[in-house]
Image (cartoon, grey):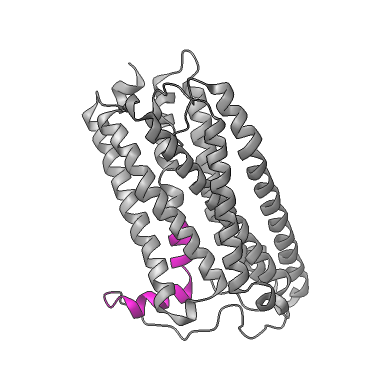
């Protein structure tokens, strides 16, 4: 039995499940992302550089799930139309640009955590709204130039089974050498740089968390109880979900293309693809933004149906210092 018979147009039940799951994902991602943006826009105490980065991430999630995932839903329900190859090229550039922009936003967020933990006294001087705005604009411009370049170099031809590919890159199957070469030359260096930079920032913050343990010997803090770790944990969670689902999707996609691949491997490939299209774009808003105390307070004030009493607001990043000389973390 082929993969299309299980999950494609020849199996209405599986097709309906996939469509329902992706439609739910789009709705949740768009609603949560818009909620983050509206709360920052309406509440003055949320209008800070670190929250503008959260809004930028929400914009990427809304654009991807709101504009790119519906194309996947269409391909699942109606099949891929080879006549739309030109549209596929445009969608490929747009999708790849969004993914690269999201990756760069993760790097900017890691830098924000780094300055907050390592240089708390100079945080407000180093992380300002104009600098964050310029960084966001530069990242978006760079990523979309890179996306257009990689797709332009990626060759042309008849692309088959595009509904199984996260990014609808031209020539993904018909001209693999050109496409892979474009990705290796243009995209991979950026991804490698971001991974190494975020890893270095993580290492420095975790090192500070260990030092906080040593400074607070009387309190016997565990690593996960330190302020540095608590500031890093939400960021690490959303990055892990984003990278992890992408790696799983790539691994199962490659394994399912091997000769003699089992039916279970095909099922795993499609499940991994669905997770890659959905999980990260919900956890971004829920885990990294809406879970924060100041966002919960804002929701209680803006949304009357949320029965949560507003907690006394403490300015983010500027609360009184503890005995160890570090600012309290708002988590």
Q: Is residue 42 left or right of residue 105?
A: left
Q: How many marks?
A: 0
Does the stretch in magenta take in 298?
A: yes
Q: Is residue 61 left or right of residue 331?
A: left
Give whichever of 132, 229 is nearer the camera. 132
Give whichever of 201, 133 is nearer the camera. 133
Q: Position of residue 116 (x, y in %)?
A: 66, 71
Give whichever of 188, 141 is nearer the camera. 141
Q: Is residue 155 above or below residue 273?
A: above
Residue sitting at 54 percent across and 37 percent down?
Answer: 247
The chief SS type of the magenta part is helix
Residue sitting at 39 percent across and 21 percent down?
Answer: 263
**Residue pushed farthest top?**
260
Q: Is residue 16 left or right of residue 325?
A: left
Q: Position of residue 200 (x, y in %)?
A: 73, 54
- Residue 32: image quadrant is bottom left
- The reply to whether residue 239 is in sight is no
Q: Is residue 265 above or below residue 142?
A: above
Q: Is residue 114 above or below residue 239?
A: below
State which quarter of the image contains the N terminus. Answer: top left
- The reply to whether residue 194 is in sight is yes
Q: Position of residue 5 (x, y in %)?
A: 29, 21
Q: Position of residue 322 (x, y in %)?
A: 68, 83
Q: Is residue 210 above or below residue 87?
A: below
The residue segment tinted magenta is 284-305
Residue sitting at 51 percent across and 23 percent down?
Answer: 255
Q: Is residue 11 left or right of residue 174?
A: left
Does the stretch in magenta take in 282?
A: no
């Amino acid at each position: 039995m082929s993969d299309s018979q299980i999950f494609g147009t020849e199996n209405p039940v599986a097709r309906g499940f996939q469509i329902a799951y992706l439609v739910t994902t789009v709705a949740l991602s768009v609603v949560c992302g818009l909620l983050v943006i509206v709360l920052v826009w309406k509440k003055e105490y949320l209008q800070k550089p670190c929250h503008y980065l959260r809004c930028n991430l929400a914009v990427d999630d809304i654009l991807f799930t709101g504009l790119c995932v519906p194309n996947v839903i269409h391909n699942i329900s109606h099949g891929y139309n080879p006549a739309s190859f030109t549209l596929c090229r445009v969608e490929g550039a747009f999708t790849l640009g969004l993914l690269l922009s999201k990756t760069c936003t993760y790097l900017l967020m890691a830098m924000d955590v780094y300055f907050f933990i390592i240089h708390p006294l100079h945080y407000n001087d180093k992380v300002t709204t104009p600098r964050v705005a310029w960084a966001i604009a530069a990242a978006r411009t760079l990523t979309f130039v890179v996306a257009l370049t990689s797709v332009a170099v990626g060759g042309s031809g008849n692309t088959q089974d595009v509904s199984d590919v996260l990014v609808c890159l031209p020539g993904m199957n018909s001209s693999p050498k050109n496409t892979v070469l474009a990705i290796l030359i243009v995209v991979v260096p950026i991804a490698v740089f971001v991974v190494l930079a975020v890893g270095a920032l993580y290492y420095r913050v975790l090192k500070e968390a260990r030092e906080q343990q040593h400074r607070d010997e009387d309190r016997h803090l565990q690593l996960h109880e330190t302020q540095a770790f608590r500031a890093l944990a939400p960021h690490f969670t959303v990055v892990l979900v984003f990278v992890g689902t992408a790696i799983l999707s790539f691994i199962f996609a490659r394994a399912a293309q091997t000769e003699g691949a089992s039916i279970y491997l095909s099922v795993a490939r499609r499940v991994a693809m669905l997770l890659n299209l959905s999980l990260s774009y919900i956890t971004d808003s829920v885990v990294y933004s809406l879970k924060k105390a100041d966002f919960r307070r804002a929701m209680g004030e803006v949304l009357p149906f949320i029965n949560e009493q507003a907690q006394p607001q403490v300015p983010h990043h500027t609360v009184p210092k503890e005995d160890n000389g570090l600012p309290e973390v708002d988590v």
